Amino acid sequence: MLTGAGISAESGLATFRDADGLWEGHHPEDVATPEAFDADPALVQRFYDERRRALPRVQPNAAHRALARLEETLGDDLFLVTQNIDDLHERGGSTRVHHMHGSLVTAWCVACDRRTPWSGDLLDQPPCPGCGTSALRPDVVWFGEMPYGMDDIHRALFGCELFVSIGTSGVVYPAAGFVDYALAGGSRTLELNLERAANSDFHEHRQGPASELVPRWVDEVLAG
């Protein structure tokens, strides 16, 4: 299962990318690349600090809570991958969430490679709890970096019975190609989205808000 920005947007969490391609008023190359961080670390830290401070102002919605109910029944048979870097799945009750693009609520020390739960700012260069250096950066996958756990994701895609995509645009790779891997492995595929994604090679499409579609679909699965 893959979730994207659409599921979080219904909680009132603004997506990074605007219609004109800007990320909250910034060009992606200015705030979401290793080169941007090297050139202006204060700008990049401030950008993600603001995103992190916004998280407590939004709450999980019915779609997040429904997926947590599904996990309670399926356990390890549900492999939930999200492109989102917020913590709404976890706050909605899910405990097995694979954040392929990292998470706003952890910080990564590039000196000792430790990842630490984090709720405060990073702009003031706090020390790493592990090694004490001021080498913390957002634990977020930037353009040019490899998403987390791709080997595990590929194994799950080739081995799953049903691949479900929820609230994704179908234009950001490698996630946009997941449906093709699932199809190659013989999986059934289902899209739950406001409108058909760019990669519309799904067996079934259901269109509407995730907060309505996902609980309805989960009820069907649990009843059947």
Image: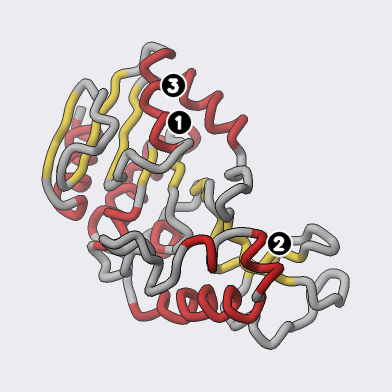
The local crowd at label 1, few if under 14, some if 14 to 19, many if 20 or more residues have their Cα within 10 Å, is few
Would residue 11 appear left or right of 25 to someone viewing this image? left
Compared with residue 4, is residue 52 higher up or lower down, i.e. above or below? below
- Residue drawn at (48%, 80%) of the image: 50
Q: What residue type is labelled 1?
A: Asp
Mark 3 vs mark 2: give the one in front. 3
For marks 2 and 1, give the CA distance.
26 Å
Q: Foreground: 161 or 144?
A: 144
Residue 108: quadrant of the picture: bottom right
Compare marks 2 and 1 and give the one earlier in the sequence.
1
Residue 218: quadrant of the picture: top left
Which residue in the structure is indicated by mark 1?
A: 77
- Residue drawn at (77%, 61%) of the image: 114
Q: Foreground: 69 or 169?
A: 169
Which residue in the structure is indicated by mark 2?
A: 115
Which residue in the structure is indicated by mark 3?
A: 181
Q: Residue furthest bottom?
A: 124
The local crowd at label 3, few if under 14, some if 14 to 19, many if 20 or more residues have their Cα within 10 Å, is some
- Residue drawn at (41%, 43%) of the image: 172
Compared with residue 65, is residue 177 higher up or lower down, i.e. above or below? above
Element marked by disc 1: helix
Compared with residue 61, is residue 189 higher up or lower down, i.e. above or below? above
Q: Which amino acid does label 3 sit on?
A: Tyr
Would residue 121 appear left or right of 179 to someone viewing this image? right
